[in-house]
Amino acid sequence: MKIPSKKVVALFCLIVLVVAGAVLCHRPDPVEKSAYIMGTLVRVRAWGAGADRAVPEALERLSALEQALSANLEDSDVARVNRAGGRGVSVSSATGDLLGEALRFAGLSGGAFDPTVGALVDLWGIGTEQARVPGDEEILSALERVDWHGVRLFDGNEVRLEAGQQLDLGGIAKGYAADVLRDQLKREGIRSGLIDLGGNILVFGENPRGGKWRIGVQDPIQSRGGVLGVVELREGSVVTSGTYERFFERDGVRYHHILDPATGRPARSGLLAVTVVSPGSLEGDALTTALFVMGLDLGIALVNGLEGVEALFVTEDGRVVLSPGLEGRFTLQGEGYRLETR
Amino acid sequence: MRRGDRFVFLALCLMVMLSLFPLFFRGGTARYARVSLDGELVERVDLQGEGLPRRIEVLGDDGSRNVILVDRGRIRMEESNCPDGLCVRRGWLERPGATAVCLPHRVMISVEGEGDLDAISR
């Protein structure tokens, strides 16, 4: 047999190298599924062995959580508590946990986040076809039924409201659900994952695309329709709340869905949107609402006192204000904004 | 350089170029978009195909109606009889990974590809 020339050997080695390189650089395909749950579009993306099974299971878990937490479903824990008119009601441990956390953030934010805003939410109906501007008297009478101090939680699973109060955990249910899904996926051996609950983003594990996760933040001025900027993180949650999400307009005024428990009206704090970057999504969900209601000065003071929590505020006068920990991790892309750190 | 060397050199260049080829398509221009109703694919739309611009009508069982406008390299929700109209205000989608969702009707348009972002917080 003729011995192959050096050139042929070299060529062969080269081909092997290129093919090996292509195989090694190939990014593994994730398993991704979406569904409409909790009134929003949910996407779960997971990498790792067992993702085929774990992702559909995660979505089933989410439907089960919805059954417990939605104020709109007749048999949910929240609906039963709201109908009980001041009597004690036993609830699932998930509902108990969530309510406990809701009360903690109500206390932390001095009531800017309040899980008893149900009466106000119903009155305004923002995001439903019945949305309207209520009269002052109606708002005052609904406000009398809003006070988180009236909620009693016994042994973590018995809840009692004051007569007339209405729980609404819509402000944090999605964040809580995202955290539950992350824990479940991790237990199933999922290496890396991305959970998108209607724009609440939670990522864990290393980004299989390499480097940090890159999460865009929606530009709150709708007509631009683009991305305000990009947050980079290794792991954790990015949640944004803004006036653009759900609203209706009457006589040239925009009435958005973030209600101020002090005034009973959509919060007017000089902000267009707040983004919270935090280890868990529940705190992100509760804090975006709280910070939006509190406004820039009080809000940034609260954030700077919390370990591991960072925030980004977009003001009506076109400023994007970062808490110090976001400096260098946020890249502004939107036009017409000024970037500041406080 | 001998004839054989030149051949090897050219082959090498060719292979390096071929192996880099996929890189040029990362985050590139939009080629396909997916339109879905209640999570089910309605159509995979070629954004560089023939006969553009054109419209796609998506009708739901409950009388919901969305009209999607497809143009060269971009796509948008043009009309919707939903209460809030947020999907229409979203405007043109051009970049890979961009989405417009009509929540009341459960209609979604998404441009295929990953783009340079993993997700968008909104």
Image (cartoon, coloured by chain):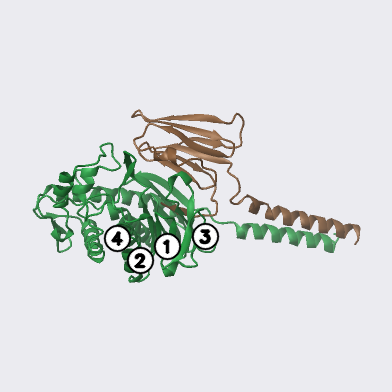
Chain colours: A green, B brown
- Is there CB contact under 8 Å for labels 2 and 1? yes
Of the two numbered discs 4 and 2 on the same chain, state the one appearing first in sequence. 4
The residue drawn where x is 20% and y is 49% is: A118
The three-letter code of the residue at mark 4 reads Met
Task: State if disc 2 and disc 4 touch (CB < 8 Å).
Answer: no
Most extreme residue toward the right, as rendered?
B2
Residue A157 at x, y percent in the picture: 17, 59
Decide which of tag 3 and tag 1 comes sooner along the chain: 3
Q: Which residue is mark 4?
A: A294
Q: Position of residue A190 (x, y in %)?
A: 43, 60
- Could you confirm whether marks 4 and 2 are on the same chain? yes
**What's the chain of the residue with tag 4?**
A
Residue count near mark 3 (Cα–Cα under 10 Å), binned few <14, some 14–19, many ≥20: some
Specify the label residue A208 is tagged with. 3
- Corner quadrant of residue B38: top left
Which amino acid lies under the numbered mark 1 shown in the image of this protein?
Val
Q: CA distance from mark 3 to mark 1?
A: 31 Å
Q: Is residue A282 left or right of residue A88?
A: right
In-image side of A13 versus A290 (left or right):
right
For this rendering, which residue is in front, A73 or A105?
A105
Q: Which residue is mark 2?
A: A300
Secondary element at tag 2: helix
Residue ID for mark 1: A321
- In the image, is residue A137 above or below residue A103? above
Where residue A163 appears, as percent x and y from the top left, is 9, 52
Earlier residue among tags 2 and 3: 3
Residue A146 position in % (x across, y down): 17, 54
| Crowding at mark 4 (Cα within 10 Å: few <14, some 14-19, many 20+) | many
Q: Nearer the viewer, residue A154 or B117?
A: B117
The kind of secondary structure element at disc 4 is: helix
Residue at 53% over, 64% down:
A211
Q: Element at badge 1?
A: strand
